Structure formats: C-alpha cells, structure tokens
Image (spheres, grey):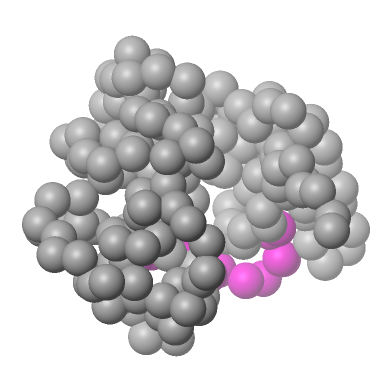
Amino acid sequence: MVKFNGINHLALITPDMDQTVRFYRDILGLPLVGAIGTDTFRHYFFDLGNHNTIAFFEYFGVTDTGSEKPAGIAAEGRQFDHLSFNVETEADMMALADRLRGHGVEVTRVIDHDFIHSIYFTDPSGISLEASYWVRDITEQPSIKDRNPVAALRDYKGSEPEMAAARAGSALSDEGNYKL
C-alpha cells in the first residue's frame, strides 16, 4: 500500500494571478515558491509547509472561472466546495481572522465541527476558504457521525466504537453541521 504524506499541490484556477499573489503571499503570508509561465497560462505555487502547496492556473483570456460559491452550500455541477488550511492553534486562527478583517476580508464566526474549529472566508477570485485547527486527533479518536452512512461504512468489520455507532444509525444532534 502506498503511504501518502500530504498534498503535493491542489491546483485551482484564478482569473487574475496578480490579485491572487497579493492575497496568498501578502495577506495570508504563504511564500510563493514556484512560477511557470507559457504563452497560454501561468501556474504559480504557494508553500503551505511540509512540502504541501496550493497552486493556481491563470489561463489567458479566461475571466469567468465560476469559483464564487459559499462553503457548505450545494451548487449544481460543482466538483469543488472549499479549501481548508490547517493552523496549529486557536490563537493562530484568531490572528488570521484579525489579519483578514484588517485587509477588508469578511470572516465568519468560529464554527465548531466537533473535532475541528474553523473560520470561513473568500479569496478575491471567489474561492471559498476555511482555516481550521484540530481540537482532537481524529486519527486516534475517529468521529463518524452520519445519520445515514454509506454502505461501505455500515459494512465495515472493524472494532472501533465510533464505526459501530455509525452502523447502528446512532442519533445525532444538529451541532457541528455545515450550515454557516
């Protein structure tokens, strides 16, 4: 089995690379570590740490990237909902929220998702973003809370109590849902 150790890069599309660089490098503070340019596109990479990057394509002549969509709200024909950046602590997340607000970016209140706490905001291209910190390690303590789990979860033969609860269709509260 292959052992994954992160995301090499997530490639998104921007209609304005200059605006994207100014937001991700200058406001979020992500170092620009790679830039490729051809006659038809630009492809820039920003470092997220630990060899994980976020990258953007700007295709010349493409101005409507169809990106604007609130996080957690269904949109017909969309494959992408939002991107969540991991931060170390609640203090880091709140400092980011203050920094974003200081640059005129609208930021949500803190959302409690049980094992992570998050804030949501949007980049200048309309891409929905989230910053989250782990409240607890779900690799050690899984959190499986789906009122109607898929067959692959219901059929799981493991012994984890959370998996058993999911197979039994345990009752859940409305806390931690994605409604913003």
Queried whether the magenta region covers residue 61, the answer comes back as yes
Residue 54 visible in the displayed image: yes
Q: Measuring 62% from the left and 61% from the top, which residue is drawn there?
A: 13
Name the residue nearer the viewer: 54 or 171: 171
- Considering the image in quadrants, where does the N terminus appear? bottom right
Q: Is residue 148 above or below residue 96?
A: below
Residue 10 place in picture, x, y as percent: 67, 53
Residue 19 place in picture, x, y as percent: 54, 42
Image-based side of 174 in relation to 77, left or right: left
Q: Is residue 135 above or below residue 4?
A: above
Quadrant in the rendering for residue 12: bottom right
Q: Measuring 73% from the left and 28% from the top, which residue is drawn there?
A: 50
Task: Tally the numbered discs.
Answer: 0
Image-based side of 59 in relation to 21, left or right: right
Name the residue nearer the viewer: 75 or 169: 169
Image-based side of 26 in relation to 153, left or right: right
Residue 18 place in picture, x, y as percent: 62, 42
Name the residue nearer the viewer: 21 or 1: 1
Q: Which residues are magenta?
A: 57-70
Residue 2 place in picture, x, y as percent: 84, 55
Name the residue nearer the viewer: 78 or 7: 7
Queried whether the magenta region covers residue 49, the answer comes back as no
Q: Is residue 135 above or below residue 42?
A: above
